[in-house]
Image (cartoon, rainbow, N blue to C red):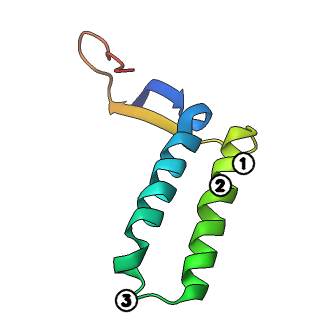
Amino acid sequence: MFVVEDIHNFGEDYDKTLMAWYENFEKSWDSLKLNYDEKFYRMWKYYLLCCAGAFRARQCQLWQIVLSKNGVEGGYKSVR
């Protein structure tokens, strides 16, 4: 039997992660473009920014569910 130990919605802060990925992508594009074309650049940029906007608008959610087999002895301690 599995016990639900914790459920957490990371969606509220996930746009920050996507924006960090976007910034790293932009900074690295000069070296990446040797292997990828302009279409890939536009599509990846669009994807990251649209996803960040959707999370910021609370239209997307990202859930983490922690399960344990038969429960954690002493109880589960969530790290936040």
Q: For this view, does 56 lie left or right of residue 77?
A: right
Identify residue for label 3. 34
Q: Is residue 34 at least partly visible in the picture?
A: yes
Q: Position of residue 60 (x, y in %)?
A: 69, 45
Identify residue for label 2. 51
The foreground one among 5 and 69 is 5
Alpha-carbon span between mark 3 and mark 1: 30 Å
Q: For this view, does 29 lie left or right of residue 75?
A: right
Answer above or below: position of 63 versus 18.
above
Q: Is residue 1 at least partly visible in the picture?
A: no
Q: In which quarter of the image is residue 58?
A: top right
Give, as a three-letter code, the residue at label 2.
Cys
Q: Which residue occupies the extreme left position in the image? A: 73
Answer above or below: position of 68 versus 71.
below
Quadrant into which the C terminus falls: top left
Which of the two discs, 3 and 1, labels the residue nearer the N terminus?
3
The label on residue 54 is 1
Give, as a three-letter code, the residue at label 3.
Leu
The foreground one among 49 and 4 is 49
Identify the residue at horizontal 51%, vertical 58% (top origin): 22
Q: Which structural element holds mark 1?
A: helix
Q: Position of residue 53 (x, y in %)?
A: 70, 48
The foreground one among 68 and 27 is 27
Circles 1 and 2 in contact, beta carbons < 8 Å: yes
The foreground one among 41 and 47 is 41
Q: Which structural element holds mark 3?
A: loop
Alpha-carbon span between mark 2 and mark 3: 26 Å
Q: In which quarter of the image is residue 47?
A: bottom right
Identify the residue at horizontal 32%, vertical 15% (top origin): 77
